């Protein structure tokens, strides 16, 4: 059995789609998968079991980025085509079964919209894939024992919690009376000068922290995050990856809708700024509000 799975260009949405892929792997244990995604999301799927081919959709004008995928997909009959991009591709290639996600904004979490594409209930949780080699490469970079991981960057600056509040929250959470007393700090972010510039104020104020900004591939980041005692970060792909990797994850939300994009995991939750959901500046999210949410999250029993 061969399955073509077309998913997002963005890391966060790509991570959320892994739950449906994991469901397909469990229900079709001999299937081989071809996954099409954006270049930045490549690492989300690079270690996926039974991955036959990974096709990167490089954005081009006039929708020409679909042509290489169509040229590959049209050469065989697929047992199942799942298209989470809502494109016409599924109807232009030979397939025994097709499932196309409906486009447009609508109420409910993105995870539910993805699961509805195949009528799967309850919606399967996202997963993270990494190899033993990824874990071995990051192990020497990480502190021994429990650590607090910080994700102070985001793809939009308006989604970033102020650096001084990240610093104050990290200090409060690792204080002797905090929920992670004495825990070392690890700061993560994506590659490139812009990510480093966004993380710079937090890195400068916390020189004792392990600086992993731009140093890890996505599978290596997943392996690192799986060891975190807590991930505290903005609404970002890294936040979704942390939750999928099994880290207790606290996502910080203001101008984006937590009802649609809150992190999903065994212990994951969103904390929202004081104001209209999805339309509130990050400055309306107080340090005390975040540290109290972190205490509640860490006190939870692990969800089944």
Image (spheres, rainbow, N blue to C red):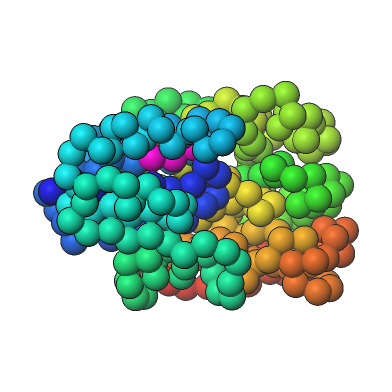
* Above or below, comparing residue 200 to residue 50 in the picture: above
Residue 54 is a magenta residue: no
Image-quadrant location for residue 137? top left
Image-quadrant location for residue 123? bottom left
What residue is at 78 percent from the left and 35 percent from the top?
Answer: 198
Where does the image place residue 85, in percent across and percent down from the top left?
Answer: 46, 52
Where does the image place residue 281, in percent across and percent down from the top left?
Answer: 85, 60
What residue is at 81 percent from the left and 74 percent from the top?
Answer: 276
> Which sits in the foreground, 69 or 165?
69
* Above or below, comparing residue 117 to residue 38 in the picture: below
Where does the image place residue 184, in percent across and percent down from the top left?
Answer: 63, 41
Res 99 seen here: yes
What residue is at 82 percent from the left and 58 percent from the top?
Answer: 282
Q: Is residue 27 left or right of residue 38?
A: left
Magenta-tinted stretch: 36-40
What residue is at 52 percent from the left and 52 percent from the top?
Answer: 13
Where does the image place residue 90, in percent across and percent down from the top left?
Answer: 33, 51
Image-quadrant location for residue 74? top left
Q: Is residue 148 left or right of residue 273?
A: left
């Amino acid at each position: 059995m061969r399955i073509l799975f077309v998913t997002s260009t963005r890391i966060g949405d790509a991570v959320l789609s892994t739950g449906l892929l994991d469901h397909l792997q469990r229900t079709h244990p001999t299937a081989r998968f071809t996954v099409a995604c954006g270049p930045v999301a490549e690492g989300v799927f690079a270690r996926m079991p039974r991955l036959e081919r990974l096709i990167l959709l490089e954005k081009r004008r006039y929708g020409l980025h679909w042509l290489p995928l169509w040229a590959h997909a049209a050469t065989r009959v697929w047992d199942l085509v799942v298209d989470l991009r809502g494109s016409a591709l599924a109807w232009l290639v030979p397939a025994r079964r097709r499932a196309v996600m409906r486009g447009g904004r609508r109420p409910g979490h993105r995870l539910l919209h993805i699961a509805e594409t195949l009528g799967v209930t309850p919606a399967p949780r996202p997963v993270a894939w990494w190899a033993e080699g990824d874990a071995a490469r990051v192990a020497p970079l990480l502190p021994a024992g429990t650590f607090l991981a910080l994700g102070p960057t985001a793809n939009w600056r308006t989604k970033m919690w102020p650096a001084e509040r990240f610093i104050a929250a990290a200090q409060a959470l690792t204080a002797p009376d905090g929920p992670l007393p004495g825990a070392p700090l690890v700061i993560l972010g994506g590659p490139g000068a812009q990510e480093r510039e966004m993380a710079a104020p937090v890195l400068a104020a916390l020189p004792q922290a392990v600086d992993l900004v731009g140093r890890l591939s996505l599978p290596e980041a997943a392996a690192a995050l799986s060891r975190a005692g807590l991930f505290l970060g903005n609404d970002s792909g890294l936040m979704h990856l942390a939750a999928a990797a099994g880290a207790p994850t606290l996502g910080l939300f203001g101008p984006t809708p937590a009802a649609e994009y809150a992190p999903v995991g065994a212990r994951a939750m969103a904390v929202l700024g004081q104001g209209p959901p999805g339309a509130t500046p990050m400055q309306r999210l107080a340090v005390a509000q975040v540290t109290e949410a972190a205490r509640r999250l860490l006190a939870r029993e692990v969800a089944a």
